[in-house]
Image: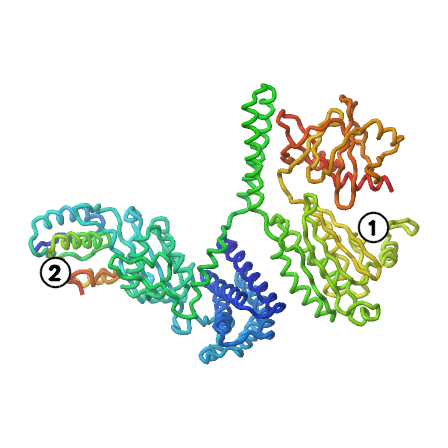
Amino acid sequence: MSEELKLFLEDSSEQLNFMETALINMQEHGVNEEDIGALFRAMHTIKGTAGMFGFDDVVGFAHIAENLLSEVRSQKIPLTTEMITLFLLCKDHTEALINASIEHTIDNELRTNNDHLLSELLKYSSEDDSKERLSPSVSKQENPLQVDSSEGTLWHISLHLKPDFFSTGMDILNLIAFLDKLGSVTNKAIVTDAIPSLDKYNPIQAYIGYELQFITKSTQTEIEEVFEFVLDDIELTIFQVNDKNQLDSWIDSISSVEAKQSKIKFLITNGFFAKADFITEESVSPTPQGEKVQTTLLSAEDTKGTVKKDQHKSFSLRVDSSKIDQLINQMSEMVIANAKIAQRADILDDSELSEATTIMSDMLESVRSSVMNIRMVQVGDSFTKFRRIVGDVAKKLGKEIEFIINGGETELDKTVVEKISDPLMHMLRNSIDHGIELPEERKAAGKPEKGVVTLSAYPDAGMIVIKITDDGKGLDKTRILEKAIAKGMVSANSDLSNKEIFNLIFAAGLSTADQVSDISGRGVGMDVVKRNIEELRGTVEIDSKEGKGSTFTIRLPLTLAIIDGFLVQSGDTKYIIPLEMIQECLELSPAYKEHMKGNHFINLRDSILPLLDVRKYFSEGESKCERENIVVLRYGDHKMGLQVDELYGEFQTVIKPLGDLFVNVAGISGGTILGSGEIALIFDIPKLIEQKMRQAN
Amino acid sequence: MNHLEYEKLTIYEVESLHKELLKWIATATGSLQLDFNRVKIIDIAAIQLLLSAQKSCAEKSCEFELLNVPPEVNQTMQTAGCANLFKGCA
């Protein structure tokens, strides 16, 4: 797929998401202008961009939908619930249509659906002329935009010869003449502004340009192909005449205000566009003739006003994520280099140098968090799309569900958000399918008929927690155990804790659903869910009470290449503990030791704190310092103390993988290079705590 | 009236034509007329030069006119969207 096509796909799916969010929002909170506007803009943008790629089927469909939306927007037609449902279907159809257009796989089913939806849309439309357009269907490959001229679409071509164009040996006139073969040129004007008078004239330099409009059935690519061999030697802009967005961005791309105004004037005087087509802020200022280019919005049909304002409000930049990754990598190297300088400053006992490195560290820290922030997106956007799925699934199963989203503003790395989306969807479906009972059953059990499913997100100890809670029937422990025993996954007489039993549902091939539905019950899924989460270095936990409901808790790291660490030493090795997980540090005083009496826990303010002796666990050598320390860690609901020798303090840690050989070392997640060149190992705290808990049990 | 002694008026001829035009314009009074009688072929580089000459003429309020333009040249002028820009082209 070409780069442009990828961008198109990305952009259109974003627009479709906007559309869905707006529709769902209106479904729940009633019709409002803002969402109608969003809906209209989404369709409008899709139409425009699809047109650029010559996806006439998409354009045709979007055009009809846009027409209706435009009438809704100008309050000619009220937006009913049925229409919202219809537009939801339209959103799905547009998505399918776009994908099929890209892959050239438009089939009969799609066409039938297309015709059906179009006739539904037109039923609502009040405009008589649109009734006449009922005929355009995908199968006929006709574009409603082109009804006015049966010959095709009207394009605007603007080309300007670069100074050394003549050296290519190509004659631009041949190309222009060729356009007449491709379609029919309706308007043509040579741009002569740049030609100097004879005394300043360089005979072998090109000064001219052309503005052309022509009607053709050819696609944009085909038009571009005409200029294929001179692309490097001309400045070329091609867009559909009725695509005002494109016109705007073309005019915007002209750098100087004067040039912009003279271009606009040229286009108007030569009859390419009407004054009303230009409504940019710049054109408010008088043109050289003192004439004002009209700036007002002329009709409600015109979307420009709102579009402009919105673009301003949420200006965003599309950047390849690999560029940000690269930036983060370079930052990492800088952090290491800075650590080295800090160390030298210490050795040299140079206070000024030390100060400089401290400032440098602070700056690096803030740059780092800014860079990380680029990748962060609010989870809310991807959560809202679950609303629809929940609604659809509930309807299908005849269940009543109230879906609550909490903490949509929580920010998470974009790739993580994308990757977690599918597992979440699966878990939500499971909750509705297996968890929530049918209304009658709920009534019988003394619960309200409407089941509640909550999806919440919040940050906790340097991790992001995503929770799915339902008030359904909970997991059936005996059934799970029976199944697992029947499948030979556990032995019949094994004594498993609740948690261990619940965790069995993550094993491949276990489904307790009696009937396999298309929603869940095939026993593939939960294992994939768990694997996906683990790939993100996250964990998932289940808590369930029979009759009361279940809670799935997913914990995800912020997936950073650099973390705030805490440097400690045990024996001869230095270790890093992720700072967010540390609650406090305390000295393992002789008084504590006496209390321990050889056990591996201490009494910390009247609660038991299990201890893990790092020196023993990793078979380190003897301690070289007199004092022993405990670092108190918290992960989720668990607490644990790490027994270490020396505490060095905060350290910006660049995570480096340990390589294949050490990848399976339990309790170590990576390594880092210290300023001195030494290597420090990074603890995998969740794993260590898990192991400690297992030992304790 | 100045005769153009070229059959072809293309990028290869523009340099010498440029020199000639400079000379003619310097001496022109009231009007500059170019006789296209012999010219069979013209290209965009030459048209561009003519446009420049027209500009220079306008600067000194001198009329710029093409005479005896043959159909072939006229056709090219039309393709170039310049037929209406020159006096003497149809």
Q: Amino acid at mark 2?
A: Leu
| Image coloring type | rainbow
Residue extending furthest front? A605
Compared with residue A413, is residue A692 higher up or lower down, i.e. above or below?
A: above
Q: Amino acid at mark 1?
A: Lys
Q: Secondary structure at mark 1?
A: helix
Can marks 2 and 1 be said to lie on one chain?
no
Q: Chain of mark 2?
A: B
- Report the front residue among B48 and A340: A340
Mark 1 is surrounded, within 10 Å at the Cα level, by few (under 14), some (14 to 19) or many (20 or more) other residues, namely: few
Q: Chain of mark 1?
A: A
Q: Is residue A123 left or right of residue A535?
A: left
Residue extending furthest top? A348
Residue identifier under label 1: A499
Residue identifier under label 2: B67
Horizontal and vertical percent position of residue A222: 41, 60
For the residues labelled 2 and 1, the Cα–Cα distance comes to: 99 Å
Q: Quadrant of the C terminus of chain A?
A: top right
Horizontal and vertical percent position of residue A547: 83, 62
Horizontal and vertical percent position of residue A133: 47, 77
Q: Secondary structure at mark 2?
A: strand
Q: Quadrant of residue A574?
A: top right
Horizontal and vertical percent position of residue A471: 78, 62
Q: Quadrant of residue A608?
A: top right
Residue A63 seen in the current view: yes
Q: Residue at x 78, y 31 (%)?
A: A643
Residue depth check, mark 2 versus mark 1: number of the one nearer the observer: 1
Q: Residue at x 88, y 54 (%)?
A: A485
